[in-house]
Amino acid sequence: MPFFKRALRTHVVVASLSLLTAAGITATPAVAEEKDQFQIAWSIYVGWMPWGYGEAEGIVDKWADKYDIEIDVVQINDYIESINLYTAGSYDGVTVTNMDALTIPAAGGVDSTALIMGDFSDGNDGVVLKGSDNLEDIEGLPVHLVELSVSHYLLARALESVGMSERDVKVVNTSDADIVAAFSSPDVEAVVTWNPQLGELKKQPGASVVFDSSQIPGEIMDLLVVNTETLEDNPKLGKALTGAWYEIMDAMQGEDEAAVEARTAMAETAGTDLAGYEAQLDSTSMFYDPAEAVSFLESDTPKETMDNVRLFAFDHGLLGERADSPDFVGIQFADGSVLGSESNVKFRFNADYMRMARDGEL
């Protein structure tokens, strides 16, 4: 069973949003008001499995009860659909990558806040060549990947590292489900993909990972994003979700029986075994401690990363037809500074609730 379907914004997503609009369902935020019932959407991925565990074990309910609210954490089988549903206002929050948060809800006008910085890919995504261990040998080759995805972004960063650009290769759009089979074909020499497909490719004769996400640390972030207006009107939601998250982080760490059982449960939900799940964790930089997450958000990395991401997004038309420059969407960081339009801030990194967790104030 596939461990995670990390296709990001593709032409299918654009079409989906268009269909929503045509049906009279606009890409608008959930109604912002003080309320006591909330829904959070999540999908299968190593760094998001804790949400399913927290829901099943009653940890989310425990923290919701503490703040006299109800939180329903709902698994959505299709990652892209989960973001579409959040963007359309059906959910108050969603698990999402930093790139998707910018190019789907934020670019679509939905003001969104990264409430929890969960992890970043630290080798889960990679560029694979057949018959060569030199990245520069990719020049002139067709490169199979999920177009306009995190893989596409990784390829762009890899090429940049050796003084090349996308003009030096030919991108071939290939489903994540077909990428392993494609690489088995004699005429496919280069692919970009993520785990578990990446792990399968490493086993094939002559395959070499010539660039991976550990070489751009912190750039592929996995977040819990919530609607900004909903969070501002309902700070209890932020406190409950953050408190639950770090209790789950504590529960899954270490080698004691309870921690192993927690990770085993997450593995089973993901359709793998404990060894498979732990292999994924090994190439994921998890922020188990809120102090680490706060330190990361207060560093220069998010600003540098989001500048790269927004340039990629604009160059590939992912900020929408109205975007006349990469500055179209404003991105606010933990220190209050803004990259891009200060009058159109639609994506925010907020460390306030993680600081509360760090300081024992939840």
Image (cartoon, helix red, strand yellow):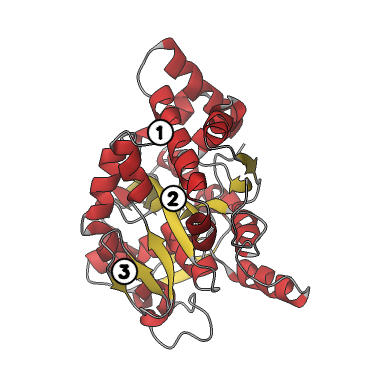
At label 1, the amino acid type is Tyr
Quadrant position of residue 259: top left
- x, y percentage for residue 231? 50, 55
Q: Residue at x 32, y 56 (%)?
A: 219
Residue nearest the observer in this picture, 161 or 330: 330
Q: Which mark is residue 223?
A: 2
Q: Which mark is residue 308?
A: 3
Residue nearest the observer in this picture, 217 or 319: 319
Residue 346 higher or lower than 291, as above or below: below
Residue 11 higher or lower than 221, as above or below: below
Query: Which element carries disc 3, helix, strand or loop?
Result: helix
At label 3, the amino acid type is Asn
Residues at marks 1 and 3 touching, judged by CB atoms closer than 8 Å? no
Q: Counting other residues with Cα less than 10 Å from the Cα at mark 1, is it few (<14), some (14-19), or many (20 or more)?
A: many
Residue 214 visible to an observer of this rendering: yes
Q: Residue at x 44, y 72 (%)?
A: 170
Residue 272 visible to an observer of this rendering: no
Sequence-first disc among 2 and 1: 2
Mark-to-mark CA distance, 2 and 1: 14 Å
Sequence-first disc among 2 and 3: 2
